[in-house]
Amino acid sequence: MRVPRLASAASALILTSFLTLSGAGSAHSAGPGYVALGDSYAAGLGAGAYDAASGDCKRSTRAYAALWAARHKPASFTSTACSGATTGGVVSQQLAPITAATGLVSITVGGNDAGFGDVMTTCLLHSESGCLNRVARARTFVDRSLPGLLDRVYDAIAAKGRNARVVVVGYPHFYQVPGNCVIGLSAASRRAINAAADDLDGVIAKRAADHGFTFADVRGSFRGHGLCTSKPWLHGPTLPPEESYHPTAAGQADGYLPPFESAA
């Protein structure tokens, strides 16, 4: 996701050593190769340690996909995940590395399609009513339009990687509610944003299941580490602004990696 592009503005609309997995490995094999797809949450925006060659895509060596590959050492690893990517961008720009020999594909996408970057910008800069109205519009889009967009990208992945295990990774709640927020959005706005994340994850999980893919739910692993907690694994509004509302390095390693590892 971006902030304003959900990898570009105050967003997406990305775990305590809940499972530090010092040596634990997945029960599954990645097969001959692993390809990672998706938006800024998959690329690792917010985690630092960006690969200069990835340019504005801001792919990080601390992203959950890169961490998994470093631990499990598949025969090959390619990430085409890119900050700001939508489902259409994945289809048109990210699928080339997938072949019939690919053993594992991961993807996190959908937040940019739903406009979560604009949601967060609106909620930060406008009134509670303006925030709630913008969240409601995003939730309507997720319910009515996103399923078809996800079907298109999932169909394309299945066609190219017919032998691959596909793991679809979701999004966390942004806020702990109630939580220790001295300033910022109202409790009603924070609850609405979390509810929109639930809608997003619900649609993603359903479409993934209908395609025979596995959904990795990160909401549980982020519990206690959202914004308004003492140890958040997400950036709040920050500089550079595009990192706002994206997982920190701890969020990728402890929030994203354990659920993905269990599913992969």
Image (cartoon, grey):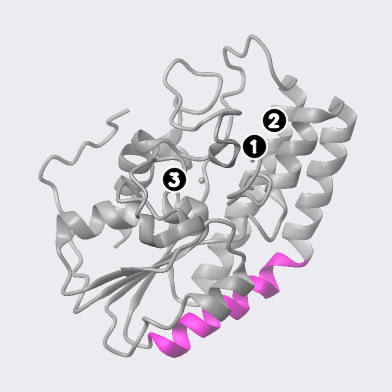
Question: In the rendered structure, does residue 207 fall within the stretch colored magenta?
Answer: no
Determine the residue located farthest toward the top in the rendered image. Answer: 182
* Residue neighbourhood size for the residue with mark 3, other residues' Cα within 10 Å, grouped as few (<14), some (14–19), many (≥20): many
Q: Is residue 43 visible?
A: yes
* Residue neighbourhood size for the residue with mark 2, other residues' Cα within 10 Å, grouped as few (<14), some (14–19), many (≥20): some
For the residues labelled 1 and 2, the Cα–Cα distance comes to 5 Å
Residue at the spot x=43%, y=71% of the render? Answer: 213
Residue under label 2, please give it.
Answer: 191
Residue under label 3, please give it.
Answer: 218
Q: Secondary structure at mark 1?
A: helix
Counting from the top left corner in percent of width and height, residue 74 is at 17, 69
Q: How many marks?
A: 3
**Relative to 10, residue 73 above or below:** below
User: What are the residue bounds of the magenta stretch?
Assistant: 145-161
Residue under label 1, please give it.
Answer: 194
Q: Secondary structure at mark 2?
A: helix
Q: Residue 24 vs residue 94: left or right?
A: left
Overall secondary structure of the magenta section: helix
